Amino acid sequence: MTLRWLLALAFFALGCGGETHPRCAQCGMLADVAPRWEARVGEARFDAPKCLFRWATAGSRPLTDAFVKDYYGQETIPALEAVYVSGSDVLSPMGDDLVPLRTEAEAERFAADHGGEVHRSSAIDAQLLSRLR
């Protein structure tokens, strides 16, 4: 085997074969590690709802075109229409997070099962985000 082939083999073996993974626009973590938690705004991807809201809050960015995944049904829903639970015993790849749910009733049921507080998206601010670790 020639040196060129050995280098090419090493390149691919180390995972440098050109495969790309989206990175979280807020923290830089791989955004496709846990699809259950993904969030997005246009082309910007996030590894968890907490990062989406931190990104929006830090830059005063609107979330009118933002989407999250409903925790139970795993359907993509508008981030501003979701109801969130903070402080539950369910952790995202980023630890404590905002668990997105489709309806207030689902959020109340989730909070009863897993603890936490129910929030509308309009109530998520820097103070609430700072309590999430």
Image (tube, rainbow, N blue to C red):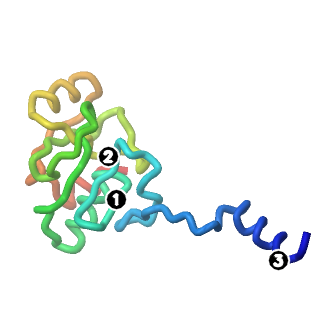
Q: Compared with residue 109, is residue 12 higher up or lower down, i.e. above or below?
A: below
Q: Residue at x 14, y 44 (%)?
A: 82
Task: Pick out the residue farthest to the bottom.
Answer: 4
Regarding mark 3 in the picture, which secondary structure is present there? helix
Q: Compared with residue 130, is residue 92 higher up or lower down, i.e. above or below?
A: above
Question: Which residue does the numbered mark 2 point to in the structure image?
Answer: 97
Disc nearest the viewer among 1 and 2: 1
Instruction: Tell me the kind of residue under disc 3.
Output: Arg
Question: Which residue does the numbered mark 1 point to in the structure image?
Answer: 46
- Residue 59: image quadrant is bottom left
The tag earlier along the polypeptide, 1 or 2, is 1
Taking the image as shown, residue 108 lies to the left or right of residue 46, namely left
The tag earlier along the polypeptide, 3 or 1, is 3
Q: Residue at x 34, y 46 (%)?
A: 37
Question: Which residue does the numbered mark 3 point to in the structure image?
Answer: 4
Label 3 and label 2: CA atoms lie apart by: 47 Å
Regarding mark 2 in the picture, which secondary structure is present there? loop
Taking the image as shown, residue 31 lies to the left or right of residue 83, namely right
Q: Residue at x 23, y 63 (%)?
A: 41
Q: Residues within 10 Å of mark 1 (few under 14, many from 20)?
A: many
